């Protein structure tokens, strides 16, 4: 038996879309460009708007399949099976409804008579090859001109003479003018005419099948009632009459249900039922009748769901059901691709999902009933894929009986089927594609939760197929959603499988992350299980291979142990585990102590760490990254004594830094938090990394509020109640320089008004480069700047102010010193105005690096 043969799926000839078969003879495509262009015009670019036909190129030595001897009477005829496996391929590929003979001949050809006789001889030889079959023959003359019969008397006479010589009806003679521009148009018109002739052939074949009806009786020929109705349905499909085809297929299905079924013939009946059901459903979708197709499929499943067959072959029943759902899903999806609308509650994904479930059940039952089967001594399954009738057993071909002819041989055949099922069938190759198809459909129709559920099942199947790396990839996508939606029970199941996959593939980074999450309070695993996982983490930190996960097979264990030994035997690079998207046993929140700091103040960052595991966890170091700290390294706490995390408690570590002058006016944020897992001196360095302030993941994945809000306070600790400050603002330092201004409140026009400024330095260091800027008040009229003069105490007049600020420098000022600065203002007009002492700027030595802001006083 072929390795890729599946006895429960539909044969390829059944799923092939049937079209009328037209053979083309006389086209020399290799040597004549004209013939090649004609063949390509017919056979290539078969758009949906063209007549559905199938063209085949015939050689001059082609032969038709031999005809069987016609039966004179059915009185004593006992059929050997329901549907013959060679009948559909015969009409699809081997028996053309019409054979078209192409010949190069113009009406005005000088050798008309000789060529006419040659054509007549070829037509006669063709009819001889066809034998007693009813296949039609047509003649197409390839002409270089554009004249056709009827345009002139000579052409019409020659056409009639040619038809007489070839013994062909006038409607079977065609002329195909060869034109590079209009060839496709001529071809489309010609194929429409040829299709009518071909369809008449199938109508005649159907008439011959109906003629047998009078010879049949319900006693001996119940199988023939099924077979003949199927033939009528298929022949109507070939002639593109979908309505008539559905009618006959439905009648065929009805006759099939009337057959008496036993464990012996049930397999053949349900295989034939699957073929007929497929035909009905596909035609219903073609006619845009999706409700009828779905109703037919549900009826089909309901009728055969309880017909399980022999207990020894129960897996065959589930294999058949799986294929039925898959086939209908394929037909449904094909209809959707061609324009059929589908909705979220009814789409192909549901059928792929059910097909996958039955495929899993097939494997489960096969392992149960076939666990003690021994290797067969003979090959009773030989020729399983080439039986004369669909669905029959290879150890009793051609026998449709209610009881097995040889009981001993029947038992041996069943054992061979069992052995083949458990030893030669890779069930994962069937299950995984079904899950993949279902997932793509549910994703398309926006059903995320069902999609994630199927992804977990697909991961389980990958794990079953010893492909844990793909399973782990799927689980990583799914568990993030489970955490965000707080499905802790689902997350727990996925984590158990994830740990197994991480162990099997020696994925050390994923193993650490999943283990820390497994130890957390969100997952309701037992303390023993959490302790076991914790011990495995300690073993890994010390460079020792972890203990295997429960349920690991011996075959996988050997490969996994070798992979861990290879990984830990070399120098392991530092490992970084991204904790932001996890809900681990270690929860971290970094927060500023205040929302604002002056540039000369020390900024404090408080890091709270909560251990929800039942045992003490040790950390080696803690570091925090803050934005806009180009001149600083990471804030690090490397004292292990401060990083001992008792179970169920919260520890707080404070880190400090002094901001730089470039940080003034900026808002600083905590970029990330990092901590090293394990006690100092661990062989394997593992860094736990939280993006941001560390609380984003914990906040997002926090458990829902308690059912009784009045008790919510009892369920929370300082880790939950303290509101984190995720950012702080750096303000400029307040100056310790007092400024007092004294002057008369009035002044005469053209009078110099003295303005005295008293400066006192109360800083702890000398003030240098003091500059006072003086200017007009912003609300003053713009023209007033031309009528105001300013001069210093030395009597030197300054430039006109304009829109600029005039500055006066008074030098340095020691600690505790005071000084007076006097300057004069003269107004050239009598209008009221106000002047502004814009600011006093103080520059301390660059070592201090402080800058003071503006001081505004109005005169």
Image (tube, rainbow, N blue to C red):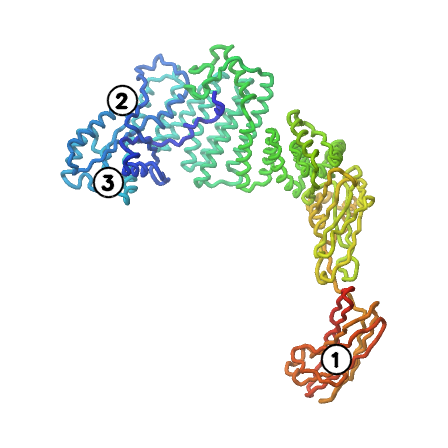
Residues marked 2 and 3 touching at CB (< 8 Å): no
Question: Which one is nearer the viewer's eye here, 401 or 657?
Answer: 657
State the residue position of label 1.
Answer: 859
Whether residue 74 is visible:
yes
The residue mark sitting in front, 2 or 3, is 3
Please determine whether, in this image, residue 791 is positioned above or below residue 811: below
Q: Residue at x 72, y 31 (%)?
A: 546
| Quarter where residue 143 is shown | top left
Q: Earlier in the sequence, mark 2 or mark 3?
A: 2
Please determine whether, in this image, residue 112 is positioned above or below residue 734: above
Q: CA distance from mark 2 to mark 3?
A: 31 Å
Q: CA distance from mark 1 to mark 3?
A: 107 Å
**Secondary structure under badge 1?**
loop
Where does the image place residue 112, in percent across and percent down from the top left?
Answer: 16, 34
Q: Earlier in the sequence, mark 1 or mark 3?
A: 3
Where does the image place residue 736, in percent across and percent down from the top left?
Answer: 81, 69
State the residue position of label 2.
Answer: 131
> Residue 177 got which mark?
3
Please determine whether, in this image, residue 726 is positioned above or below residue 271: below
Where does the image place residue 240, in percent across and percent down from the top left?
Answer: 35, 33
Please determine whether, in this image, residue 635 is positioned above or below residue 143: below
Question: Which one is nearer the viewer's eye here, 64 or 370?
Answer: 64
**Secondary structure under badge 2?**
loop
Q: Earlier in the sequence, mark 2 or mark 1?
A: 2
Q: Badge 3: how crowded within 10 Å, few (<14), some, or many (20+)?
A: many
């Amino acid at each position: 038996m072929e390795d890729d043969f599946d006895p429960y799926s539909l044969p390829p000839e059944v799923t092939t879309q049937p079209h009328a078969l037209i053979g083309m003879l006389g086209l020399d495509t290799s040597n004549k460009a004209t013939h090649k262009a004609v063949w390509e015009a017919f056979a290539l670019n078969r758009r949906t708007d063209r007549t559905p036909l199938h063209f085949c190129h015939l050689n001059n030595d082609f032969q038709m399949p031999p005809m069987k001897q016609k039966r004179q009477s059915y009185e004593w005829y006992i059929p050997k099976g329901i549907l013959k496996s060679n009948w559909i391929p015969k009409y699809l590929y081997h028996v053309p409804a019409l054979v078209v003979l192409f010949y190069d001949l113009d009406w005005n050809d000088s050798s008309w008579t000789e060529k006419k006789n040659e054509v007549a001889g070829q037509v006669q030889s063709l009819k001889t090859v066809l034998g007693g079959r009813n296949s039609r023959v047509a003649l197409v003359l390839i002409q270089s001109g554009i004249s056709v019969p009827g345009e002139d008397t000579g052409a019409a006479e020659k056409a009639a003479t040619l038809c007489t010589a070839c013994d062909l009806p006038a409607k079977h003679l065609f002329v195909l003018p060869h034109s590079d521009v209009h060839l496709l148009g001529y071809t489309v018109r010609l194929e429409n005419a040829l299709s009518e002739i071909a369809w008449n052939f199938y109508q005649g074949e159907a008439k011959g099948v109906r003629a047998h009806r009078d010879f049949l009786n319900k006693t001996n020929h119940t199988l023939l009632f099924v077979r003949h109705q199927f033939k009528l349905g298929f022949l109507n499909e070939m002639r593109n009459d979908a309505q008539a085809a559905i009618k006959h297929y439905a009648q065929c299905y009805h006759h099939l249900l009337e057959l008496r079924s036993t464990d012996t013939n049930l397999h053949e009946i349900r295989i034939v039922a699957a073929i007929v059901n497929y035909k009905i459903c596909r035609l219903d979708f073609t006619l845009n009748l999706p409700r009828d197709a779905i109703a037919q499929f549900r009826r089909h499943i309901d009728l055969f769901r309880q017909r399980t067959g022999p207990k020894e072959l129960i897996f065959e029943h589930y294999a058949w059901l799986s294929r039925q759902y898959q086939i209908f899903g394929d037909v449904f999806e094909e209809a959707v691709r061609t324009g059929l609308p589908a909705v979220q509650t009814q789409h192909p994904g549901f059928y792929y999902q059910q097909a996958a479930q039955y495929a899993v059940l097939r494997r489960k039952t096969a392992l149960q009933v076939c666990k003690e089967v021994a290797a067969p001594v003979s090959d009773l399954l030989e020729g399983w894929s080439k039986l004369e009738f669909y669905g029959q057993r290879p150890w009793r071909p051609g026998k449709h009986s209610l009881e097995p002819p040889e009981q001993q041989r029947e038992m041996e055949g069943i054992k061979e089927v069992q052995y083949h099922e458990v030893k030669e069938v890779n069930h994962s190759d069937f299950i995984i594609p079904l899950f993949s198809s279902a997932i793509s459909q549910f994703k398309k129709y926006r059903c995320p939760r069902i999609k994630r559920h199927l992804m977990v099942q697909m991961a389980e199947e990958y794990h079953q197929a010893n492909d844990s790396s793909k399973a782990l990839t799927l689980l990583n996508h799914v568990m993030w959603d489970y955490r965000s939606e707080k499905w802790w029970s689902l997350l727990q199941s996925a984590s158990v499988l994830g740990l197994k996959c991480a162990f099997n593939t020696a994925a050390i980074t994923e193993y650490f992350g999943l283990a820390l999450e497994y130890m957390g309070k969100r997952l309701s695993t037992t303390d023993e299980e959490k302790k076991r996982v914790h011990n495995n983490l300690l073993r890994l930190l010390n460079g020792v291979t972890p203990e295997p996960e429960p349920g690991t097979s011996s075959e996988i264990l050997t490969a996994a142990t070798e992979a861990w030994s290879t990984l830990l035997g070399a120098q392991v690079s530092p490992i970084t585990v991204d904790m932001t998207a996890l809900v681990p046993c270690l929860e971290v929140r970094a927060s500023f102590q205040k929302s604002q700091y002056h540039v000369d103040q020390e900024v404090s960052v408080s890091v709270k760490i909560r251990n929800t595991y039942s045992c003490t966890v040790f950390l080696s170091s803690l570091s925090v990254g803050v934005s806009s700290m180009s001149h600083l390294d990471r804030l690090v706490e490397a004292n292990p004594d401060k990083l001992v995390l008792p179970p169920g408690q919260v520890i707080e570590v404070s880190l400090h830094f002094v901001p730089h002058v470039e940080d003034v006016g900026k808002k600083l944020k905590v970029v990330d938090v990092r901590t090293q897992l394990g006690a100092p001196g661990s062989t394997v360095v593992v860094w736990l990394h939280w993006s941001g302030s560390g609380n984003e993941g914990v906040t997002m994945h926090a458990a829902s509020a308690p059912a009784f809000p009045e008790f919510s306070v009892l369920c929370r600790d300082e880790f939950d109640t303290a509101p984190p400050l995720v950012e702080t603002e750096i303000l400029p330092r307040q100056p310790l320089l007092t400024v007092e201004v004294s002057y008369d409140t009035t002044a005469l026009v053209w009078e110099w008004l003295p303005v005295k400024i008293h400066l006192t330095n109360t800083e702890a260091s000398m003030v240098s480069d003091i500059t006072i800027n003086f200017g007009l008040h912003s609300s003053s009229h713009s023209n007033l700047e031309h009528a105001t003069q300013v001069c210093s105490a030395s009597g030197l007049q300054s430039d006109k102010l304009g829109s600029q600020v005039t500055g006066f420098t008074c030098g340095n000022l020691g600690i505790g010193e005071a000084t007076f600065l006097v300057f004069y203002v003269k107004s050239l007009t009598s209008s009221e105005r106000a002047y502004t002492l814009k600011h006093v700027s103080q520059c301390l030595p660059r070592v201090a690096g402080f800058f003071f802001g503006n001081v505004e006083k109005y005169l």
